[in-house]
């Protein structure tokens, strides 16, 4: 996580956008007034939203945890996918 003041981000906006996207860096844009702002990639944002959704649905979360336990225990099955024509 980087903390950078507003003026620096404004002067180097493209570089910080690239850093957020390419390095998955979270950037805290500090301001003297009005509160700080967080910049992160869309992929990182989507990941956070997906995790919040899964964790808010207890049934889906428990199913995911059970599946992960089965995977770690080697209780998997190989399946062949049938493609639609």
Image (cartoon, rainbow, N blue to C red):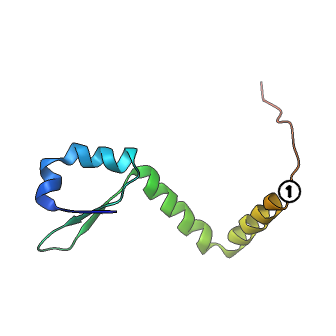
Residue at (87% x, 41% y) in the render: 79
Query: In screen coordinates, is 76 left or right of 43?
Result: right
Label 1 neighbour load within 10 Å: few <14, some 14-19, many 20+? few
Label 1: element kind: loop
Residue at (20% x, 47% y) in the render: 13
Front-most of residues 12 and 34:
12
Query: In screen coordinates, is 15 left or right of 65?
Result: left
Which of the 4 image quadrants contains residue 26? bottom left
**x and y, in percent, of residue 45 in the image:** 43, 57
Image vertical order of residue 56 relative to residue 27, above or below: below
**x and y, in percent, of residue 49 in the image:** 50, 62
Query: In screen coordinates, is 33 left or right of 54?
Result: left
The residue labelled by disc 1 is: 74
**x and y, in percent, of residue 70 in the image:** 83, 62
Residue at (79% x, 60% y) in the render: 72
**x and y, in percent, of residue 69 in the image:** 79, 65
The N terminus - image quarter: bottom left
Q: Could you tell me how many numbered marks the image carries? A: 1
Residue at (46% x, 50% y) in the render: 43
Front-most of residues 30 and 34:
30
Query: In screen coordinates, is 16 left or right of 72?
Result: left
Which of the 4 image quadrants contains residue 65? bottom right
Front-most of residues 12 and 44:
12
* Residue ranking furthest to the top: 85
The C terminus - image quarter: top right
């Amino acid at each position: 996580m980087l903390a950078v003041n507003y003026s620096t981000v404004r002067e180097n906006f493209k570089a910080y956008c690239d850093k957020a996207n390419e390095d998955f860096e979270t950037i805290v844009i500090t301001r003297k007034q009005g509160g700080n702002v967080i910049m992160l990639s869309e992929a990182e944002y989507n990941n956070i939203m997906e995790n919040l959704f899964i964790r808010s649905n207890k049934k889906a979360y428990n199913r995911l945890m059970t599946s992960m336990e089965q995977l770690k225990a080697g209780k998997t099955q190989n399946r062949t996918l049938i493609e639609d024509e």
